[in-house]
Image (cartoon, rainbow, N blue to C red):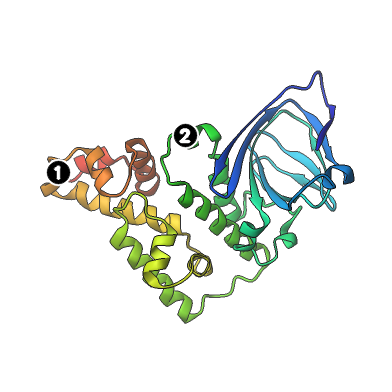
Amino acid sequence: MVVARAVTGPFKGEITAAGLGPLTLVHGVSTAHDCVRGVEHVALSTSRQFHLIVNRQSSWNLHHRDWVHVGRGDAVLLDSSLGHYLNFVQAFDNVHLVLPEAWLGQWLPDPAAFVGRPLPSDAIWARALTAFVAQLTPEDLQHGALPINLIVDHVGALLALCANQMSGEGRPPALRQRQLCDLVREAIVQRCTECSLGALEIALALGISVRTLHRTLAACEQTFGGLLMSARVALATRMLESPLMARLTISEIGRRAGFSDPSHFARVFRRHSGITPAQMRHGHI
């Protein structure tokens, strides 16, 4: 694609990117502008990819099959096999995930059905997806607070939940799915202390595919990452409340609960519990 015009003043922009397993994470900031991907650009592509874009700073307009308005914080999925026209009427700060066709097909049975349709941040699962993706930047990935495979699986699971919601299916999970979901949850609880635990390890332990695991959780409106963090917070809470653990530092309790980074432990614990690990400890010891 090319920048078609600067809306006001000279065009300025900066793009950084980082590998995210099978995905690519792109962070872009720019002044207001229009950009276009025409048939001549599509012809240069060597493979089909999908692009999930979340603009964190402003709303914008998009022509990709049809004209749509994408609100601030909303997400939209683009297909590289189609042209597009992007109209950023204000300066933007966007997070953009490049999704290979084969990878996305593991999560969405028909990705093309959701191309060019805004995922509004006021819809439950779209809000979870956009909030998660908006926090990802190439710079933050260098700190390695979460394993790459866990981040990638979480993105896929949230996309599947969004697609299910947008398609209007929303059927209650079958008994078999509920039972398998319970087995996955139990296995996660048993192994949540493993810092590098991912969906692959749990799927292998249960004798199912990773795809089946994620689709089962999505049918029960759960994600692997959400269950893992809940299990770790619950374990950390029990240790913080126990007088037998009073000699352990909070960082050590976080490590024993499966958190490799103390600051990440504190953020996740507060998000789940509403208080810090220190406040939890002081309230019970």
User: Which amino acid, by three-letter code, is at mark 1?
Assistant: Ile
Q: Is residue 78 left or right of residue 235?
A: right
Task: From the image, tell me which residue sits under label 2.
Answer: 142
Marks 2/1: CA distance? Answer: 36 Å
Residue at the spot 74% in from the left edge and 60% down from the top edge: 112
What's the residue type where badge 2 is placed? Gln
- Residue 78 located left or right of residue 196: right
Q: Nearer the viewer, mark 2 or mark 1?
A: 2
As helix, strand or loop, the secondary structure at mark 2 comes to loop
Residue 205 appears in which quarter of the rendering? bottom left
**Is 74 on the left-hand or right-hand side of 221?**
right
In this view, the residue in front, 61 or 273, is 61
The label number, if any, that marks residue 285 in the structure image: 1
Mark 2 nearby-residue class (10 Å; few <14, some 14–19, many ≥20): few
Task: Point out residue 81 in the picture as x, y percentages from the top left corner.
Answer: 80, 52
User: Which quadrant, please, contains the N terminus?
Assistant: top right
Which x, y percent locates residue 57? 65, 33
Residue 46 horizontal/vertical position (percent): 76, 49
Which quarter shows the C terminus?
Answer: top left
The single residue placed furthest to the front in the displayed view is: 46
